[in-house]
Image (tube, rainbow, N blue to C red):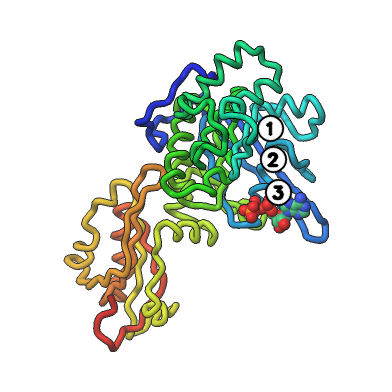
């Protein structure tokens, strides 16, 4: 990669739109059966984790607190030794490396942090120059590279500012420029936007997506926030209790989550929990006094079909819509709507096959006992 051959613009897109070339599809990181035990009495913190990060991709690793994300990232950059398993970066095994060979391998994996980790005694330019100085890059080259790196992250005018004179977003931009200085093939982002407000978070994510698109650098985003993954990651791995709950293209994982943990992350952006009053009337089995509660997931082009009108006209159902919203995951529309299909119990199989024929996912999440009180909406 040559980050210096490209410069950033202000109109950078937030999402990847270009399909990766066949060369890009090979893994830049491969983790095989990684297990980490700190304390045998506490059990493994990472338990038989295998995953692959494609070259040129933005791969989110999401999990709740304690899921093992930081341990995984520390194994990837060689700060923590796995108990067992193997890690390959750019086809080269890094597990077991020590001393100078480990340091050389780590140059190819740069990192940005939640609290930026800048030296307060150095200017923005001085911070970006640091890894180049440590690597013994000649001074004249450093003088040429540093301004280009600062320009790449949109900080061309802040070379002489000290960290205390910079906003959180600007500090993270310095952190990104410093991480890119040695032209690594992987950028690890460990909760890099967690200390930033939503607007600055979006700007930093836009910058990361732009750098990924321009330079082809692979980015691994460690986060506990679904919104971060949703905005820029093309692949996601969901960690839970040290194990992989799900992994795959972001849209597929969150449009059709298989695990409880992925579903709960989805709920955090597409709030589709039932109103309490309806939840209290919900039962698992149908009876003469119930109506089915349907959750319909709309994806892609199907998001534009007149489904609700068809439920009324063709199936004679009176839909009582409880919640509906279209959101965007990796730039693709994902709609989730929950409704009580009043009068729909007898026609349920026909309704579900109609939804399936449109490529929609219909799920009966329970059966609501009819309310005596008017207005369940
Ligand atoms: N150096 C260590 N020694 C012993 N236990 C550790 C160590 N580092 C982490 N752990 C334990 O490993 C588990 C996973 O921690 P880890 O920090 O990897 O999770 P995480 O998903 O990054 O959580 P968070 O989002 O809260 O940082 C926790 O139970 C933690 O207490």
Q: Eyeballing the image, is 322 above or below 80?
A: below
Disc 2: which residue: 32
Q: Which of the two discs, 3 and 1, labels the residue nearer the N terminus?
A: 3
Q: CA distance from mark 3 to mark 1?
A: 15 Å
Where residue 72 appears, x then y in whole percent? 67, 45
Q: Quadrant of the C terminus?
A: bottom left
Q: Is label 3 in contact with label 2 (beta carbons under 8 Å)?
A: no
Q: Which of the two discs, 3 and 2, labels the residue nearer the N terminus?
A: 2
Quadrant of the image occupied by residue 112: top right
Disc 3: which residue: 48
Q: Is label 1 in contact with label 2 (beta carbons under 8 Å)?
A: yes
User: Residue at horizontal 81%, vertical 28%?
Assistant: 99
Disc 1: which residue: 88
Going by the image, does 265 lie left or right of 360? right
User: Residue at horizontal 19%, vertical 68%?
Assistant: 312
Q: Secondary structure at mark 2?
A: strand
Note whether residue 183 is visible.
yes
Note whether residue 21 is visible.
no
Q: Which of the two discs, 1 and 2, labels the residue nearer the N terminus?
A: 2
Q: CA distance from mark 3 to mark 2?
A: 8 Å
Q: Quadrant of the N terminus?
A: top right
Where residue 41 appears, x then y in whole percent? 82, 61
């Amino acid at each position: 990669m040559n980050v210096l051959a490209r410069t950033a613009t202000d109109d950078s897109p937030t999402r990847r739109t270009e399909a990766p070339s066949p060369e890009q599809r090979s893994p830049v990181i491969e983790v095989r059966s990684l297990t980490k035990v700190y304390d045998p009495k506490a059990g493994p913190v990472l338990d038989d984790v295998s995953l692959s990060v494609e070259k040129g991709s933005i791969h989110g690793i999401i999990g709740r607190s304690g899921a093992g994300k930081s341990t995984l990232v520390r194994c990837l950059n060689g700060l923590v030794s796995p108990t067992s398993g193997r890690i390959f970066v750019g086809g080269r095994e890094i597990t077991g490396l020590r001393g100078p060979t480990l340091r050389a391998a780590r140059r190819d994996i740069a990192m940005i942090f939640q609290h930026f980790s800048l030296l307060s005694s150095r200017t923005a330019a001085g911070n970006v120059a640091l890894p180049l100085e440590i690597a013994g890059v000649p001074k004249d080259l450093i003088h040429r590279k540093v301004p280009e790196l600062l320009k790449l992250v949109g900080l061309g005018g802040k070379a002489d500012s000290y960290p205390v004179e910079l906003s959180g977003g600007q500090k993270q931009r310095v952190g990104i420029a410093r991480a890119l200085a040695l032209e690594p093939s992987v950028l690890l982002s460990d909760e890099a936007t967690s200390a930033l407000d939503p607007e600055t978070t979006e700007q930093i994510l836009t910058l990361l997506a732009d750098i990924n698109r321009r330079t082809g650098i692979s980015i691994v985003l460690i986060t506990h926030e679904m919104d971060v993954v949703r905005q820029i990651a093309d692949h996601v791995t969901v960690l839970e209790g040290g194990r992989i709950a799900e992994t795959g293209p972001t849209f597929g994982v969150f449009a059709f989550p298989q695990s409880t943990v992925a579903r709960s992350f989805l709920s955090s952006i597409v709030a589709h929990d039932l109103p309490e009053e309806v939840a209290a009337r919900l039962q698992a089995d149908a009876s003469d006094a119930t109506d089915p509660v349907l959750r319909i997931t709309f994806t892609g082009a199907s998001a534009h079909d007149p489904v609700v009108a068809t439920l009324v006209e063709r199936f004679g159902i009176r839909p009582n819509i409880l919640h509906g919203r279209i959101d965007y995951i990796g730039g693709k529309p994902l709609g989730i709507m929950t409704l009580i299909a009043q009068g729909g119990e007898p026609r349920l199989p026909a309704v579900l096959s109609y939804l399936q024929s449109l490529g929609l996912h219909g799920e009966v999440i329970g059966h609501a006992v009819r309310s005596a009180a008017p207005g369940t909406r």
